[in-house]
Image: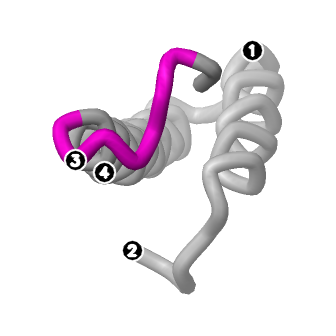
Amino acid sequence: MQEELTIEQAFDKLEKLIEHMETEIPLEESFDLYKEGVELIKMCNDKLDKVEKKIMILEENGELGDEF
């Protein structure tokens, strides 16, 4: 994909893609935007999975309590 985005930047870009797709655009452009959106969602899921794994490791080591 493009440069590394934060999750917040990716969500913002997804929102703009959706807004653009809701307008009348050619089918080819719609497909390209859909493909870009899927890539953004995958990137977000990967980042969230990494954070979740780190939290689970911290909980196992006792370094992160119930306050999280």
For marks 4 and 1, the one nearer the N-term is 1
x and y percent of residue 45 in the render? 34, 38
Of badges 4 and 1, nearer the viewer stands: 4
Res 61 label:
3
At x 80%, y 19%, the residue is: 23
Labels 1 and 2 touching (C-beta < 8 A): no
Q: Are marks 1 and 3 in contact (CB under 8 Å)?
A: no
Q: First in sequence: mark 4 or mark 2?
A: 2
Amino acid beneath label 1: Glu
Which residue, given by chain and number where applicable, does mark 2 sit on?
1
Q: Whole-Å distance between the Cαs marked 1 and 3?
A: 47 Å
> Closer to the observer: label 1 or label 3?
3
> In the rendered view, does 33 fall on the left or right side of 23?
left
- Residue 31 lies, in percent from the top left, at 40, 37
- Residue occupying image coordinates x 59% and y 25%: 68
Q: Quadrant of residue 48?
A: top left
Q: What secondary structure is found at the residue carrying circle 1? A: loop
Where are the magenta residues, as a range?
Answer: 60-66
**Mark 4 or 3, nearer chain start:** 4
Residue indicated by mark 4 = 54
Q: Find out whether the residues at labels 4 and 3 contact each other: C-beta distance under 8 Å.
A: no
User: Residue 67 sits in which quadrant?
Assistant: top right
Residue 15 shown left or right of residue 43 in the figure:
right
Cα–Cα gap, marks 1 and 2: 23 Å
Tell me the crowding category of disc 1: few under 14, some 14 to 19, or many 20 or more residues within 10 angstroms, Cα based: few
Q: Which residue is mark 1?
A: 22
Q: Is there a contact, CB below 8 Å, between mark 2 and mark 3?
A: no
